[in-house]
Amino acid sequence: LVQESLHATFAPDAPIPLRIALLFAAMAAWDAPSRQRLSSEDLRLAVTASSLEEAPDRERADVADLIKSVQRSRLPSLSGPLLPHDSPNLAPMPSPALSHLSRSTSWCDAEHRRNASPEVGELARQLCTPGGFRRGHLHARASEEGRPEDERPPAWSTSLQSSISGSMRLYEQAFGMAMLDEDGRPLLDERQSVAGGLGNVAVAATLFKANLGTNILYMPHAFNQGGYVVGLAFLVSLAFLSVICVARLTQCKTGSKESYGDIMERATGATGRGAVNFCIVLLQVGTCCCYLVNVANMVGESFLPHVDRRILILVQGVVVAPLVLIRNVAKLSPITVFGGVMTILGIALTFGAIGARLGSDGVSDVEPFRPQGLLVCLGIACFTFEGIGLAIPVFESARHPHKFVAVYSMTITGILVLIVGMSGLGYFAFGSATDTLVLINLDKGVLSDTIRIMFSLVMLLSFPLQMLPAIRIVESLFLQPSRPHTCDKHLKSAFRVFFIALVAGVSIFASTSLANFVSLVGAVCGLPLAFIFPAICHRRLVAVRGSCAAFSDLGFIFFGLLVTLVVGVENCANWGK
């Protein structure tokens, strides 16, 4: 065995690590104190361990662990070292008292390197994401060319998956909520934010999704309530005022990671934050109730006409309950992306279906002005612009904050064109028979059933994300943050199931007059968030006393309070009429 080891060691074609390992094995074969010999199988295992050292992704400490494992299994009574003590990388043989240990005691600096150089682990994580090697190659070439990092495209540092997850995190940041893991504990990893910032296109896409959804399907009925001239005037006026209020709200922001509630608290104290949270809870719960009612109506209209709508609402509550139990909002990104695609496709198909109906049957009976439904029309129009809560986190994540207001204005203009187009087509096609949800008016057929199925899926998949702010805010009032090794998570899960049952009960009541419910939610919950609170913050924090801006803020506040009071009373007094 010694002769074979020496012959292999001095062979010119043998790699250096193999020579060293075989020489050590030959020396250990004649260990005088133990008088024990290594078998040929031991030698082969040592050769295998040393050959692993040639792999670039393994460390010398791993080779030492393998050799020591061979030594423990083959020579449990050996008291001397298998490898020389002066080896800089391989550890000595442990004493017989430690031979029962099941894992290696050799020193490895992997944990030390992770703590001392966290950027190494971050780089490994980025390389493991889809497209990571391509982005790493682009960065390497840019570094060779001497190109600074701030001049490189942000897409080189952010994968599509990270961008989607980061955009999902905006919903948590919008309402000042801490990011949670699946156990309900706060996440301390700041990598979840949008890396590199959102470009103008990404800002427009995020705002577009936040402000346009199933709310476009209510506006044909709003035109039916107040007339197409009045409805058009309301939409244009509210869109213009919302842009002004968002611009003033962004002027109030001073620090990073500051939510809508933080700004309001800085302006008016804890009472202001409580008012914002109250309106957010009511607005999100009202939106989710509309989802349940609409899905029940569409499914019942197309497939289950003889089933009571209340039963369908309760069944939906059972279906969406497991999704609401998800704490980590990033895990909702796949279904949210799917819902966004389905929304755009569904709106396009709805335009086609209503346009075909209008082309075949002509214009129905329409009126430019209907005073009896004026306030209901105004409330539904207020429900349309409900995405102001997301304006602050999107502004904070924007790569070019100075262009945010311009991007927001163009996005709202595009949304306004779509809503006016849908409202006009729907009202002119169905006239006074226009339902609260225009999809109910579509003729029965494959196309109409497909559209209803698509929007039903959109509403059910959007339900968890819309419900998230309301549940998290209400949870913070009654339950403490989750602690490890406790039943806090199960207690919160039970609370969420109870909350969904409560929402289903409210939805059953809302189904008795959906038009009044939508108008009430828009005026009482959406309008303060869009007009009253931004004006209060701007007047307290930015506007100079006695200036035109301060007086205009008072005008916004008076207008918002008046509309909220009058529309709320009108809908409650004429519920279901």
Image (cartoon, rainbow, N blue to C red):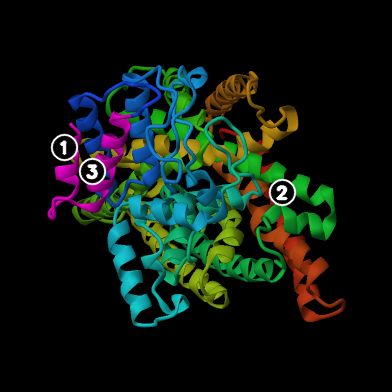
**Spatial separation of the CA atoms under disc 2 and disc 3:** 65 Å
Residue 427 placement, left or right of 575:
left
Q: Nearer the viewer, residue 187 or 383?
A: 187
In the drawing, what numbered circle is on residue 14?
none
Range covered by the magenta-colored residues: 1-30
Q: Nearer the viewer, residue 174 or 522?
A: 174
Q: Which residue is mark 1?
A: 3
Secondary structure of the residue carrying numbered label 1: helix
Q: Amino acid at mark 3?
A: Ser
Q: Nearer the viewer, mark 2 or mark 1?
A: 1
Give the dominant element type of the magenta stretch: helix, strand or loop: helix
Identify the residue at horizontal 36%, vertical 43% (top origin): 334
The earlier-in-sequence mark between 3 and 1 is 1
Above or below 521: residue 129: below
Q: Residues within 10 Å of mark 2 (few under 14, many from 20)?
A: many
Q: Nearer the viewer, residue 80 or 539?
A: 80
The earlier-in-sequence mark between 2 and 3 is 3
Q: Which residue is mark 2?
A: 276
Secondary structure of the residue carrying numbered label 2: helix
Q: Is any atom of residue 438 visible in this view?
A: no
Query: Residue 3, located in which quarter of the rendered image?
Result: top left
Residue 305 placement, left or right of 519:
left
In the drawing, what numbered circle is on residue 51?
3
Residue 255 placement, left or right of 225:
right
Q: Amino acid at mark 2?
A: Val
What is the quadrant of the C terminus in the image? top right
Outermost residue toward the right?
Answer: 545
* Residue 5 part of the magenta-drawn span: yes
